[in-house]
Image: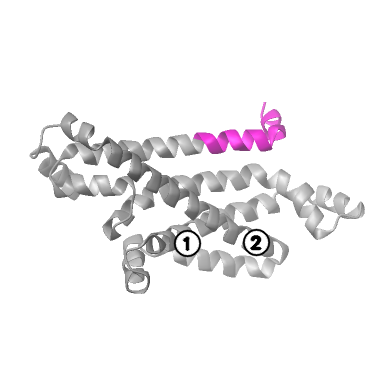
């Protein structure tokens, strides 16, 4: 029997499912944990993007930086999340910072890679035409490259957001974790209801934020939607 299946059997042997009494008594807790889950996710992706974007622009402008930047962010991405959280506890304690640092680091590879891909896919003739018109590097990036690369960049933000929502649940092991704490409580008290509720809410949050980012992309780059018709 797999470990996950064994855990579900243990939970199923506890309180009845669905445990409506638990749901009624813990509605406020679910809302509080939901705010924590959204806050950790948004902060990690926003801070990650603020770090990843200049790195990606540098790597796109200076090709010799591309391989080192991708290698470093790739190595960070391969570090087991639980090990990274535990390693930070002696330095930052059981705090939001301890959860936020690894969550942010894990977004870097996705955001850097997609931003580089988006910038590199801007047609060369468009870039050369803009330079011939007197565009500086900053104006070229802001007015030409960034708008054209936006769909690929936002695609990276969508992947990073969904990935982070899943990782946030792991931070429940260090006292954070939003709905991850509800899932953990379900296992500790052999109650399947909190585990299922936490899982369903996390998936629902991933779907909602993904749809919001799709709407944002369509809002900011309506020409890309026209091109796909």
Q: Secondary structure at mark 2?
A: helix
Q: Is residue 155 magenta?
A: no
Whether residue 88 sits left or right of residue 160 in the image: it is left
Q: Which residue is mark 1?
A: 105
Disc 1 versus disc 2: distance between alpha carbons?
A: 15 Å
Q: Which mark is residue 45?
A: none
Q: Residues within 10 Å of mark 2 (few under 14, many from 20)?
A: few
Task: Point out residue 133 in the picture as x, y percentages from the top left corner.
Answer: 92, 51
| Residue drawn at x 58%, y 61% as measured from the top left | 51
Judging depth in this view, the residue of 226 and 135 nearest the camera is 135
Nearest the eye: 63 or 185 = 185
Q: Is residue 30 left or right of residue 68?
A: left
Occupied quadrant, residue 23 = top left
**On the picture, is 183 further left or further right than 146?**
left
Disc 1, SS: helix
Residue at (37% x, 51% y) in the render? 168
Q: Main secondary structure of the magenta part?
A: helix
Screen quadrant of the C terminus: top right
Q: Start and end of the magenta stretch?
A: 211-229
Residue 154: % across, % down: 59, 44
Q: Earlier in the sequence, mark 1 or mark 2?
A: 2
Find disc 2 in the rendering and name its residue. Answer: 54
- Above or below, comparing residue 59 to residue 219 in the picture: below
The percent position of residue 25, horizontal first and vertical second, equals 21, 35
């Amino acid at each position: 029997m797999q470990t996950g299946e064994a855990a579900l059997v243990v939970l199923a042997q506890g309180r009845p499912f669905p445990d409506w009494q638990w749901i009624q008594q813990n509605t406020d807790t679910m809302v509080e944990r939901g705010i924590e889950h959204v806050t950790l996710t948004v902060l990690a992706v926003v801070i990650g993007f603020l770090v990843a974007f200049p790195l990606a622009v540098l790597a796109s402008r200076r090709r010799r930086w591309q391989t080192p930047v991708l290698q470093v962010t790739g190595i960070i991405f391969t570090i087991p999340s639980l090990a990274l959280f535990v390693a930070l506890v002696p330095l930052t304690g059981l705090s939001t910072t301890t959860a936020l640092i690894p969550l942010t680091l894990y977004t870097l590879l996705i955001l850097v890679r997609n931003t580089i891909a988006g910038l590199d896919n801007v047609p060369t003739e468009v870039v050369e035409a803009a330079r011939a018109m007197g565009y500086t590097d900053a104006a070229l990036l802001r007015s030409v490259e960034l708008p054209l690369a936006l769909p690929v960049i936002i695609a990276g933000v969508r992947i990073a957001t969904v990935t982070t929502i899943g990782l946030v649940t792991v931070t429940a092991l260090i006292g954070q974790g939003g709905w991850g704490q509800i899932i953990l409580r379900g296992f500790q008290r052999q109650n399947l209801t909190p585990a299922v509720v936490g899982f369903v809410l996390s998936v629902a949050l991933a779907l909602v934020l993904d749809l919001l980012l799709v709407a944002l992309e369509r809002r900011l780059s309506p020409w890309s939607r026209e091109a796909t018709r």
